[in-house]
Image (cartoon, rainbow, N blue to C red):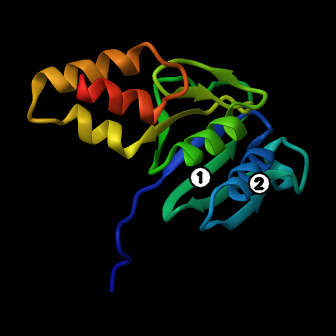
């Protein structure tokens, strides 16, 4: 019987894949390293150094590749973290922004170059509101923020 088709996201790092994966797996609940593949003599890299790490964050599969300096991670791809509380937003924001760069609208780039969106679930609900004026107020409030603030978004929703 054929194997079931699956998909995952491959993240390209320049020698930091193992450190990044260890950091992410320590930060998120229900995270685990699935498989580690090491370099062999014939590939021109140090023997037994980490080449690929398959891991999961909250049920989502990723691959971290130590691909070298040819390519860089950019803001064109980001990982969304959907949070229920301000405490969750503050926790993930603080950990991921440490050594990285805070952007705007709930976006940040971590110390490894990976971009994240730390989003309250209520934001997604309010932006999908049947009331276009409410959605616009929330959007404008979000656009003025760096780290997202649930109380301020809710105040904007109320007008």
In this image, 14 relative to 63: left or right?
A: right
Q: Nearer the viewer, residue 155 or 2?
A: 155
Other-residue count near label 1 (Cα within 10 Å), few / some / many at <14 / 14–19 / ≥20: many
Which percent across, then down, holds residue 23? 75, 49
> Could you tell me if the residues under marks 2 and 1 are in contact, i.e. CB atoms within 8 Å?
no
Figure quadrant of residue 125: top left
Q: Nearer the viewer, mark 2 or mark 1?
A: 2
Return the residue at label 1: 63
Which residue corresponds to the image point at 48% horizontal and 30% vertical from the top-left?
149
Circle 1 SS class: strand
Please give the count of numbered marks on the rendered protein.
2
Task: State whether residue 130 is above or below residue 20.
Answer: above
Q: In the image shown, does 73 or 156 lie closer to the viewer?
A: 156
**Relative to 64, 48 lies left or right:** right
Q: CA distance from mark 2 to mark 1?
A: 13 Å
Q: Residue at x 88, y 57 (%)?
A: 48
Measured as percent of width and height from the top left, residue 143 is found at 39, 15
Rendered residue at 51%/18% (across/down): 104
Crowd rating for badge 2 (residues with CA inside 10 Å; few <14, some 14–19, many 20+): some
The part of the image, by quadrant, that contains residue 122 is top left
Question: Which mark identifies residue 22?
Answer: 2
Residue at 24 percent across and 29 percent down: it is 158
Quadrant occupied by the N terminus: bottom left
Q: Which mark is residue 19?
A: none
Q: Where does the C terminus fall, quadrant-wise?
A: top left
Whether residue 133 sits left or right of residue 51 in the image: it is left
Rendered view: 43 above or below 1:
above
Q: Secondary structure at mark 2?
A: helix
Q: Is residue 110 left or right of residue 144?
A: right
Q: Position of residue 61 (x, y in %)?
A: 51, 59
Dot 2 or dot 1: first in sequence order is 2
């Amino acid at each position: 019987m054929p194997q079931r088709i699956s998909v995952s996201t491959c993240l390209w790092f320049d020698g930091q894949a193992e450190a990044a994966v260890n950091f992410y797996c320590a930060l998120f609940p229900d995270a685990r390293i699935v498989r580690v593949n090491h370099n062999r003599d014939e590939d021109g890299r140090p023997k037994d150094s980490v080449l690929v790490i398959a891991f999961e964050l909250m049920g989502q599969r990723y691959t971290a590749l130590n691909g070298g300096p040819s390519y860089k991670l950019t803001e064109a791809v980001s990982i969304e973290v959907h949070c229920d509380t301000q405490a969750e937003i503050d926790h993930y924001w603080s950990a991921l922004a440490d050594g990285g760069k805070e952007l705007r609208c709930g976006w940040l780039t971590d110390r490894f170059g990976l971009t994240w969106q730390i989003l309250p679930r209520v934001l997604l609900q309010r932006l999908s509101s049947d009331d276009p004026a409410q959605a616009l107020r929330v959007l404008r409030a979000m656009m003025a923020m760096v780290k997202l603030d649930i109380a301020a978004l809710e105040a904007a929703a109320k007008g």
